[in-house]
Image (tube, helix red, strand yellow):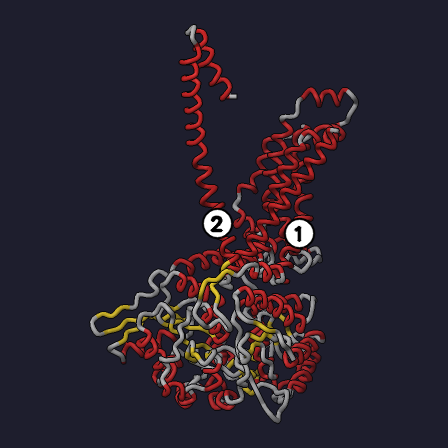
């Protein structure tokens, strides 16, 4: 918008002032264009500087590390030399049952977490938008507040609530003769999902709520006039209109979920059911910092990155195809 | 209520965990401050061993030319090894570092521990138990000097054994029968604990049975964590676990402390060092414990393995390896060194230099064990240590995977033998990615 008005004003002024518009008009046009480019350059430099330093260089380093290694021949006690090892580290990662197990864990986590998150956040946003809820601002704040708590603190709070012997929740259940082990073999993943939901539900709800605010009121009114009840309005009118937000939230949640790290890392302190290679991110951390195996860690990072990109691309493609089919 | 943590202490521990990691990661700044001032060479020494300060003080009192700056660091699993790796990467590792036997090959491969073959004098070599030096020697090159070698023994509650009318078991079969007896007679007591965090204990049981988890004799790392002797040991303990004849939980836990403190567990199968640790941790049980040899598979050819024990390595970063070796040699072979360590009252280490055993026998306060001459027992047991054993190149990782799997067994998933296979599968990718030659032949 700004660009068009900017360029129009000088040309218009030049045309009015001068009978021979071409020379000075062109000069002014060029100057404006140059100013724009400079402004764009200045404004975008920080972004590209950060992109290069915190994304491209680390990714490049990881790719390099995954293909080269400080090898010692035989038993490994000889002098080190850096050699190109091809796909050796990738072969090691992809044949490591603990890494594949971690991928499986995260896949299961995504299957539980993402639908719960998207449906839950959307349902809350629709409720708030429908006007059923009194004290809307307060409800919104209450739901959003957990997101302001840093992930590690949240995990600590929940660790306290999950740990037998100190948890008031478990004590309460025990009084009712119910034994609950939040950190057992089958309950530990749902327990992690619960922490993540608690932290992020409010944030995604706000995203949906903002999108719902942009739905034209006349569309809603039209549906009411046509006899749609509040539930039908919410599900068949509002929801399709915030489709773009749903896709966006799904992708962000997916990317976030694939990097599962903080919660299991902290819970692993008090549950033997979470091992040091529970998720791919924990595997990478363990490989680099306790096993001193940088090639392996780098290869695992690249595998995780490729999985993330592929899945994000898959979600985008899938939804855009669905979109175009719907349009037809 | 003993054994039950207060809410506040657990919360404090939880918040301290990440902080402790961060602190240990960045406090390695003054590591390699070894320097020659005048005629005195200053070297730095890191250790988590009890009584190290007393030893260093004794060394510094008697040596003019070398002065040692000692820094107590957290034990390996609590961040000590991470601290050492980070310091080595940053080029400021101490001159002398303490490594437990299982970590020696890993630190040697990573180039943290220096090849000290030429620094180890023939005199020192002769003083050391060959099985101990064998654990720190690879391809005929020595990477660390053993301080103590700890044969696994059976610590038992003599008073409770009398109460149940039990004799010390000579074979594992007798031991299993006793385990059943104890549980039958007192349902909340058990003969022994199978530790879910006990790869080192399990390794020692397997070692005793003749297992060979790692072998380098053919020029490649042969890994066979689930070889026939290990499977035999795994099946034995699995039977005891299935019958609920043993406790199964972590040994490094309040639960285990409570089991020992409240007299719920009758024996502890640990290294010789644990005698001193027990005296220190539970002075109130004075006179109740005695020590016996480990039960045997074959009484005709008795064997044992080691559980615990430490070595000293000189780092690549050290600028004074000769001075560092002089300090190490004094520490592992001089009577004053052992006297100083035992004077702290918290150690019962069994020296890797057999010449020092008589010093230990005289310096150790026997009253806790009712006057039993435990050093003579240790001496007999040390000779039975099998010499076939080697530790692997990434023992911390192998240990974690195996123990994670043990913990699942305690939750009712899988078996001990499967845990061994899981640990093997979780170890191989690491070794391959390091570029080591590997094989997986097994018996």
Q: Nearer the viewer, residue A136 or A190?
A: A190
Q: Residue furthest left?
A: B38
Chain identifier of the residue bearing label 1 in the image: A
Classify 10 Å Cα crowding around label 1: few (below 14), some (14-19), many (20 and above).
some
Most foreground residue, B150 or A169: B150
Does residue B254 appear in the picture of this structure? no
> Residue A251: percent from the left, percent from the top?
62, 41
Q: Is residue B296 visible?
A: yes
In the image, residue A156 sits, relative to residue B361, either above or below, namely above
The image quadrant that residue B247 belongs to is bottom right
Q: Is residue A305 left or right of residue A46?
A: right
**Image coordinates for residue A111, horizontal then vertical, percent:** 69, 48
Above or below, comparing residue B106 to residue B384 in the picture: above
State left or right for residue B118 relative to residue B172. Answer: left
At x 56% / y 83%, what residue is drawn?
B154
Q: Estimate the x, y position of residue A190 in percent, counting from the top left.
A: 66, 52
Q: Secondary structure at mark 1?
A: helix
Q: Chain of mark 2?
A: A
Residue at 27% x, 68% y: name it: B35
Between disc 1 and disc 2, the foreground one is: 2
Q: Quadrant of residue B89?
A: bottom left
Question: Marks 1/2: CA distance?
Answer: 25 Å
Helix, strand or loop at label 2? It is helix
Q: Which residue is mark 2?
A: A58
Which residue carries the number 1 mark? Answer: A107
In this rendering, do the residues under marks 1 and 2 share a single chain?
A: yes
């Amino acid at each position: 918008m700004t660009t068009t008005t900017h360029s129009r004003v000088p040309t218009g002024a030049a045309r009015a002032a001068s009978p021979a518009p071409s020379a000075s008009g062109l000069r002014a046009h060029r100057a404006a264009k140059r100013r724009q480019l400079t402004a764009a350059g200045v404004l975008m430099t920080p972004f590209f500087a950060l992109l290069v330093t915190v994304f491209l260089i680390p990714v490049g380093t990881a790719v390099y590390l995954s293909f080269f290694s400080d090898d010692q021949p035989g038993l490994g006690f000889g002098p080190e030399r850096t050699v190109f090892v091809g796909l050796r580290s990738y072969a090691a990662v992809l044949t490591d049952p603990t890494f594949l197990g971690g991928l499986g864990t995260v896949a299961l986590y995504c299957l539980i977490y993402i639908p719960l998150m998207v449906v839950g956040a959307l349902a809350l946003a629709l409720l708030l938008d429908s006007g059923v809820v009194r004290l809307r601002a307060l409800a919104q704040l209450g739901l959003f507040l957990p997101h302001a708590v840093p992930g590690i603190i949240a995990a600590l709070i929940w660790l306290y609530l999950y740990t037998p012997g100190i948890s008031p929740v478990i004590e309460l259940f025990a009084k009712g003769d119910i034994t609950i082990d939040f950190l057992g073999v089958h309950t530990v993943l749902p327990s992690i999902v619960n922490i993540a939901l608690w932290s992020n539900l409010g944030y995604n709800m706000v995203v949906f709520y903002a999108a719902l605010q942009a739905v034209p009121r006349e569309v809603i009114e039209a549906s009411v006039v046509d006899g749609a009840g509040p539930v039908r309005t919410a599900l068949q009118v509002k929801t399709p209109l915030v489709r773009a937000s749903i896709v966006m939230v799904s992708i962000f949640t997916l990317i976030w979920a694939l990097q599962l790290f903080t919660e299991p890392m902290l819970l692993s302190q008090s549950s033997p059911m979470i091992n040091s290679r529970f998720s791919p991110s924990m595997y990478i951390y363990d490989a680099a910092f306790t096993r001193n195996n940088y090639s392996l860690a780098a290869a695992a990072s690249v595998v995780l990155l490729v999985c993330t990109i592929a899945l994000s691309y898959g979600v985008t493609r899938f939804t855009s195809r669905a979109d175009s089919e719907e349009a037809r | 209520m003993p054994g039950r943590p207060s809410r506040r202490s657990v919360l404090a521990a939880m918040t301290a965990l990440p902080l402790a990691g961060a602190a240990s990661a960045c406090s390695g700044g003054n590591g390699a401050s070894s320097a020659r001032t005048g005629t005195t060479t200053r070297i730095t020494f890191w250790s988590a061993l009890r009584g190290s300060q007393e030893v260093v003080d004794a060394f510094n009192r008697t040596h003019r030319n070398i002065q040692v700056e000692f820094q107590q660091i957290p034990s390996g699993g609590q961040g000590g090894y991470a601290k050492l790796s980070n310091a080595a990467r940053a080029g400021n590792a101490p001159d002398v570092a303490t490594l437990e036997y299982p970590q020696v090959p890993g630190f040697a491969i990573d180039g943290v521990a220096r090849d000290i073959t030429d620094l180890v004098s023939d005199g020192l070599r002769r003083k050391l138990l060959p099985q101990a030096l064998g654990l720190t020697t690879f391809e005929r090159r020595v990477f660390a000097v053993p301080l103590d070698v700890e044969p696994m023994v059976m610590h038992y509650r003599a008073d409770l054994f009398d109460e149940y009318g039990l004799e010390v078991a000579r074979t594992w079969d007798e031991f299993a029968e006793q385990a059943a007896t104890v549980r039958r007679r007192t349902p909340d007591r058990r003969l022994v604990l199978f530790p879910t965090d006990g790869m080192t204990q399990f390794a020692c049981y397997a070692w005793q049975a003749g297992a060979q988890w790692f072998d380098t004799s053919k020029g490649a790392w042969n890994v066979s964590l689930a070889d026939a002797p290990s499977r035999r040991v795994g099946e034995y303990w699995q039977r005891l676990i299935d019958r609920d004849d043993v406790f199964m939980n972590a040994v490094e836990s309040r639960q285990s402390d409570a089991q020992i403190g409240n007299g719920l567990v009758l024996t502890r199968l640990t290294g010789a060092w644990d005698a001193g640790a027990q005296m220190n941790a539970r002075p109130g049980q004075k006179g109740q414990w005695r020590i016996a040899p480990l039960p045997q598979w074959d009484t005709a050819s008795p064997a044992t393995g080691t559980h615990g024990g430490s070595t000293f390595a000189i780092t690549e970063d050290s600028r004074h390896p000769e001075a560092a070796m002089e300090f190490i040699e004094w520490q592992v072979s001089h009577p004053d060194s052992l006297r100083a360590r035992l004077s702290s009252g918290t150690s019962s280490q069994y020296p890797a230099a057999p010449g020092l055993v008589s010093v230990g026998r005289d310096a150790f306060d026997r009253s806790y064990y009712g006057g039993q001459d435990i050093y003579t027992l240790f001496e007999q047991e040390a000779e039975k240590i099998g010499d076939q054993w080697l530790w692997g190149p990434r023992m911390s990782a192998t240990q974690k995977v195996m123990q994670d799997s043990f913990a699942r067994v305690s939750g009712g998933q899988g078996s001990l033998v499967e845990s061994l296979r899981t640990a093997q599968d979780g170890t191989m990718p690491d070794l391959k990615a390091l570029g080591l030659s590997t094989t997986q032949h097994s018996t």
